[in-house]
Structures are given as C-alpha cells and as structure tokens.
Image (spheres, rainbow, N blue to C red):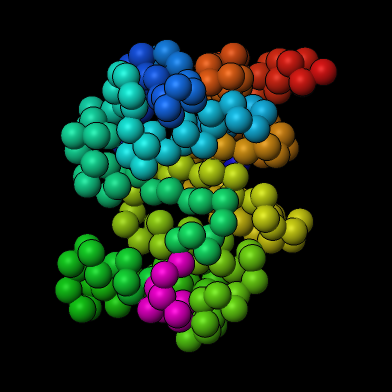
Amino acid sequence: MRTAPRTGDEDVALIAFDTVSVTAGDRTVLADICLTLRERRIAVIGANGSGKSTFARLINGLRRPSIGAVTVDGLDTVKAAKEIRRHVGFLFQDPDNQIVMPLVEEDLRFSVKALKLGPAAENARIERILDTYRLTHLRHQPSHSLSGGEKQLLALANAMLREPRYLVLDEPTTLLDLKNRKRVMNAIDGLEQTVICVTHDLEIAATAERVLVLADGRVAYDGTATDAIAAYREMAA
C-alpha cells in the first residue's frame, strides 16, 4: 500500500474522530476514539472483534457514532451523509456486496447515473474506468461470473467512478489468491487518493505511513508501521 505521488499542491486531507464511541445493545464496540488522520496511507490492524470494521464504516457514514462525531474535511458523517458518500469510497471484503447489475458495463453505468453527467461525459468516464482497471474486455460479461480478483477490481472501479478523495478498504484481499491479491493491491497502490485499509495482512500494513492497532474497541497503539506491527505481535504473543 505504497503512497502515490501527488500531482499538485492539494490541501492536506483530514479525518477526525472526536471522542467517538459505538455501542450495540449493552456491548461497547468502540470506546473513546480520539484521532486526527492526515497521512495518505493508513492501515488498521487488530484481532477479530477489535472494532476494525466498525471503525472503517464510521468514516463514510455506514455506521453512526453512539457518542461523539466523525468529520471528513470538516463534514460531519451523520449530518452530511450524502456528501460524505461522494467524498469517501468504500471497498468491502466481499465484492458481491457491491455488484448489483448483471453485466459489468451495466454495473458501472448504474453507479455513474447518480452523478448526472450527461450521456457523453458518462460514456467517457466509463470508458476511462474500464481501461484503467483493465476491464474493457469484460464489459459484456456477467458480473457474477468474474473471478474473485476481477470482481474486486470491478468493485474498486465502481468506487472510483465518483472520483472520491478517500478510499476505505475493509479486508480487500482476504478472499483473493496470491495473483489476484497482487493485482488488486497494485491498482490501489497507484491511487492518488488517501487510503485507509483495514487488514489482517501485515505485509500490506507494513507499507503504510501510519498504522493503528485496535484492541477491545480502543486504539492500543498508533505509530509507524514497524513499531505498530511489533506492538501488535507482542499483544498477540
């Protein structure tokens, strides 16, 4: 998950968690999260049940804080949910959760319709995204007949159609074999967007600028990849 070079003097991206807690019934999923995220490549690691997926979903409003607030470039993820979804793309572990139309091109067209670009601009964006993710030869193929890696690339292409500033990944390579894992991560590495990746793959986490270790719903460690992974290994010993 290497950092792609910036092409200009863009403002520094900013995600802020202001004393955020999330509860589900009588269970605390996340507790007292206070963070400011500015780095271009951030990984989130931790054991199963540590709150990683909930943390990821808070960033694009898929989950609401029970207490506190999450903001993205100053926009509250609850109060400005619709705008947040335009700025924050999301990639699930299982791409079948994001593929809704029977054919590849239809699935992309379904996503781009919401942008109301007009026919020419819409077609141009679809052609560009098909080419970028090497899906052009699959445009008329049934979406659910694709390989795992092709499905994940289609899900990524759908997320990137909106040209978000951020991309949140929730275990994007767990269901992939080594070849397709490399294919998907190479596509993600080339992005200019800020990427926040929840992962069990410590090789992916090792390439991040900053790594958060979650344990029991709290940030147990926050630092460089080398130090955070070492701390995680020690916790797991």
The residue under the point 55% across, 75% down is: 144
- Residue extending furthest front? 26
Q: Position of residue 184 (x, y in %)?
A: 61, 56
Judging depth in this view, the residue of 215 and 24 nearest the camera is 24
The residue under the point 18% across, 67% down is: 116
**In the image, is 50 to the left or to the right of 12?**
right
Quadrant in the picture for the N terminus: top right
The residue under the point 54% across, 16% down is: 219
- The magenta segment is 99-107
The residue under the point 76% across, 56% down is: 178
Q: Position of residue 138 (x, y in %)?
A: 53, 81
Residue 213 vertical placement versus 172 (above, below): above
Q: Where is residue 3 in the image (x, y as percent from the top left)?
A: 54, 38
Judging depth in this view, the residue of 145 and 26 nearest the camera is 26
**In the image, is 103 to the left or to the right of 113?**
right
Judging depth in this view, the residue of 224 and 9 nearest the camera is 224
Task: Judge whether residue 16 is colored magenta.
Answer: no
**In the image, is 189 to the left or to the right of 75?**
right
Quadrant in the picture for the C terminus: top right
Residue 227 vertical placement versus 43 (above, below): above
